[in-house]
């Protein structure tokens, strides 16, 4: 790669200390992507993408939001335009994404996967489309080939309790060097006020083989699926909630609430909260019993544009940051588990940067000395997985806790071309430490700080999740 390329060896590294930390310690560490939305089917089938649009733009609502903002019609985003036309519209958008992380990610991904140093623009679009598509049409760039190329040791996809895990079973019997695991995401069983709740209960009945006629039946059905996931290697759960629900309840109350829902009666806000609290506590207790890690993604305001939601469905780019109160319910929920010694390893991801210090201080309340970094403040997530967001998250964690125990980055992505986000994170991390070494705020002890960098990049996650 030429030294004058935009993505050069010392990209984002502002001094010699940052450079040494990145090149000598961080850069060669493998990747553990412990939370993502990659398709296990595409991995099991070792899919080969026909072109870069299919690998890069399909499903990427980050790009879609930018294109819409520029005034590009939906036809060229999720519509019926050809793949090349969609790529050309993305190429038209990229020069206008300056100072958005998409600009960095775009050029970093072109460089790391395809050795392309050219800046993507309308002038270079056709050449880059053809060059990348030619490379993608080889086994080296199949889904499994990409995992090997990017030195990915572990991938945790995200599945609903009703999933058969058939592709994970296939992968478990394959010779793929990357370990593909799953995480258990039962949010649809929690959101009792969602319009699709009763339909979901029917799907859960079919998957579990349990007739769900009561709250007790529901818990048993979920238990069957937890056991099924556990038997198939799952050791991680995941929840995408606006906030942690918490209120007092008893089993008789929750049973009546669930029966009302089965009878298609409306529930009050208090009844909804009681049910959500009860079922989430039950699930967390079962995670603890099996030694799982539980993850909570908090603070999103989803599906804001109801017109476009009706047209395109969820997860198509109509979500934003919310400002829900978080601290009190989160504290009470974690404490209700901890007081019974049923709080498992927990990762809390925050989407509202105003709550960074809240979350960073909250985890210290429940790190009881039993496990290193038992309760984690997760890496900058979604709108915050960019240089400024990651830096603020790490500063809050450093000031309120121990960044040395941090389990680092994940992609949370649906794209197989997103793994350079780990590199991006590591460069930001090394620059953060490098700047403070230069300023005399940290000692010039490269072996020790280098070890901390490697731990955050890989070793801490490997230990935390007990990955082999």
Image: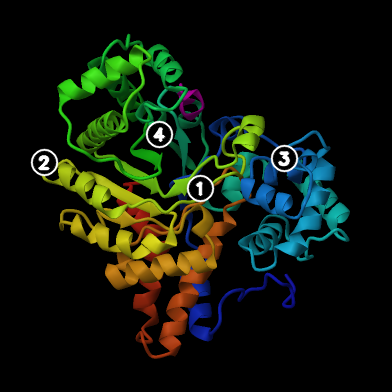
Q: Name the residue nearer the viewer: 59 or 405.
A: 59
Identify the image quadrant of residue 441: bottom left
**Marks 1 and 2: which is nearer the front?**
2
Measuring from the top left, give residue 175's x and y in whole percent: 51, 35
Q: Find the distance from the CA under tag 3 to the CA under tag 1.
A: 18 Å
How would you rate the neighbour count of disc 2 (Cα within 10 Å): few for under 14, some for 14-19, many for 20 or more?
A: few
- Please, is residue 363 above or below residue 445 in the view? above
Measuring from the top left, give residue 285's x and y in whole percent: 21, 35
Which type of secondary structure does the marked residue at label 2 adopt?
Answer: loop
Residue at image mark 1: 412
Residue at image mark 2: 340
Q: Find the distance from the CA under tag 2 to the CA under tag 3.
A: 48 Å
- Please, is residue 53 above or below residue 7 in the view? above
**Marks 2 and 3: which is nearer the front?**
2
The quarter in which the N terminus is drawn is bottom right
- Please, is residue 377 above or below residue 242 in the view? below
Residue at image mark 3: 54
Q: Find the distance from the CA under tag 3 to the CA under tag 4.
A: 26 Å
Q: Could you tell me which residue is drawn at 34 percent across and 18 percent down?
A: 261
The earlier-in-sequence mark between 2 and 3 is: 3
Q: Could you tell me which residue is drawn at 77 percent across and 51 percent down?
A: 71
How would you rate the neighbour count of disc 1 (Cα within 10 Å): few for under 14, some for 14-19, many for 20 or more?
A: many
Residue at image mark 4: 185
């Amino acid at each position: 790669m030429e030294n004058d390329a935009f993505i050069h060896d010392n990209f984002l590294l502002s001094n010699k200390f940052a450079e040494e930390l990145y090149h000598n310690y961080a850069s060669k560490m493998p990747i553990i992507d412990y939370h993502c939305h990659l398709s296990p089917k595409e991995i099991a089938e070792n899919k080969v993408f026909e072109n870069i649009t299919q690998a890069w733009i399909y499903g990427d609502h980050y790009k879609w939001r930018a294109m819409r903002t520029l005034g590009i019609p939906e036809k060229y985003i999720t519509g019926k335009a050809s793949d090349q036309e969609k790529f050309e519209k993305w190429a038209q958008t990229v020069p206008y994404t300056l100072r958005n992380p998409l600009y960095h990610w775009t050029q970093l991904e072109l460089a790391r996967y395809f050795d392309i140093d050219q800046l993507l623009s309308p002038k270079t679009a056709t050449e880059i489309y053809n060059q990348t598509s030619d490379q993608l049409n080889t086994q080296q760039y199949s889904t499994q080939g990409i995992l090997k190329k990017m030195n990915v040791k572990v991938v945790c996809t995200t599945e609903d309790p009703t999933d058969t895990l058939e592709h994970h079973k296939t992968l478990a019997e394959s010779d793929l060097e990357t370990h593909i695991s799953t995480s258990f995401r039962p949010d649809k069983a929690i959101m009792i006020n969602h319009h699709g709740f009763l339909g979901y209960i029917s799907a859960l009945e079919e998957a579990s083989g349990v007739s769900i006629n009561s709250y007790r039946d529901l818990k048993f059905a979920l238990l069957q699926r937890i056991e099924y996931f556990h038997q198939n290697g799952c050791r991680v759960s995941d929840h995408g909630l606006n906030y942690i629900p918490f209120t007092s309840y008893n089993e008789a109350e929750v049973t009546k609430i669930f029966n009302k829902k089965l009878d298609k009666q409306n529930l009050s806000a208090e009844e909804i909260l009681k049910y959500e609290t009860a079922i989430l506590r039950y699930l967390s207790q079962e995670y603890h019993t099996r030694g799982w890690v539980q993850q909570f993604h908090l603070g999103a305001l989803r599906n804001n544009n109801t017109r476009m939601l009706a047209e395109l469905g969820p997860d198509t780019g109509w979500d934003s940051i919310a400002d829900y109160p978080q601290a009190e319910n989160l504290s009470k929920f974690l404490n209700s588990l901890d007081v019974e010694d049923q709080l498992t390893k927990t990762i809390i991801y925050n989407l509202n940067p105003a709550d960074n210090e809240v979350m960073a201080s909250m985890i210290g309340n429940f790190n009881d000395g039993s496990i290193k970094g038992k309760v984690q403040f997760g890496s900058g997530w979604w709108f915050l997985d960019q240089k400024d967001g990651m830096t603020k998250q790490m500063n809050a964690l450093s000031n309120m806790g121990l960044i040395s125990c941090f389990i680092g980055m994940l992609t949370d992505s649906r794209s197989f071309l997103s793994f350079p986000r780990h590199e991006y994170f590591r460069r930001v991390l090394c620059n953060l430490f490098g700047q403070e070494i230069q300023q005399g705020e940290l000692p010039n002890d490269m072996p020790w700080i280098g070890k901390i960098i490697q731990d955050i990049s890989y070793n801490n996650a490997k230990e935390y999740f007990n990955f082999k």
